[in-house]
Image: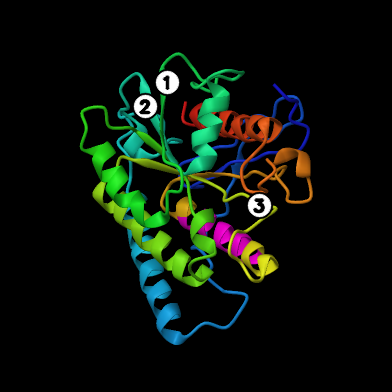
Amino acid sequence: MHVYSEASSIGFNGTYSQKVQQKKGVQVVKQAEKRPPSHQPQSSDNEEDLGTIRALVARVEALEKERRQPIDIEAGPSSAPAGLLSLPVPVKIVLCGHSILFWAHRRASSSIPGTQLQLSAIVTVRWEARRGMLWDALLPSVCRIMSSADRPHVLLIHLGENDLVQRPGMDLLRKVTHDLTWLICSFPNLLLVWSDMLARRVWRGAFHPNRIDRSRKWVNRNVRALVLSLGGAYIPHDRTRFHAPHLFCDDGVHLSEQGCDFFLEDLMLGLRGLLISLG
């Protein structure tokens, strides 16, 4: 497994979380500032779009206020989200997303850290990845997963890059905000983890690749804030940069073996830090 030399962090809701001790100079968990998500776009957008975002943010704030209600001290440690205090063993994690997860799963099955990401023995990891998956397929997939007897406690989502060329960043953010808020309202005991959308060397079909990458960064920032306000967490992938060709396949989209190793290590450290913080 490659040595993780850069600082990696995972943020989660400050109301219920605590900082995890740093090990070997690598920051695994970062305390999030307690504030509502900011949705200020870099370019001008019409008032209808902004009004929709404001309405969705209001729903998120109402949900966060509800989650701040006092927790029964006999139920468990107050540092963990209320929905996770009585989790059965094993803790079930589902990773849902497109081809980045699909090929990472293939890589993990034949290398360290393995498909279970070297997590605790009381944790099971299930991969639900589909090549070419778009954001609109998320809710049907999650509803199918949650309707099964083996429903997860933690849902990690890596999705959205395939949508960026097809729809404006504001439109994607509006859809993500609506869907993630709906998921938490529908499954309040589910912990959401956002895996940041990755940089690409090639954005297929894009006339202005630099604009697509700026949109990716902007959506990532706003979805991070949204997920934190919903009591969830995020995992960045700061080492995967478009100017590092050795991390990508020849198509400039998918990750090379080394790129997959970095990606898997990010997931492993992020999820491990989250589980430690929850006790």
Give amino acid for label 2. Lys
Span colored in magenta: 214-226
* Disc 1 and disc 2 in contact, CB within 8 angstroms: yes
Residue name at image x 46 percent, y 36 percent: 79
Q: Is residue 78 above or below residue 186?
A: above
Q: Residue 239 at what x, y percent from top left? A: 72, 42
Residue 268, can we see it? yes
Q: Residue at x 73, y 25 (%)?
A: 2
Work out whether residue 40 or residue 163 is closer to the camera in this orientation and state it: 163
Mark 3 vs mark 2, foreground winner is 3
Check disc 3 and report the residue beneath it: 199
Give me the C-alpha separation between circle 3 and circle 1: 30 Å
* Three-letter amino acid code at the position of disc 1: Val
Q: Which mark is residue 123?
A: 1
Pointer 2: what residue? 92
Point out the frontmost of discs 3 and 1.
3
Is 176 placed above or below 46 here? above
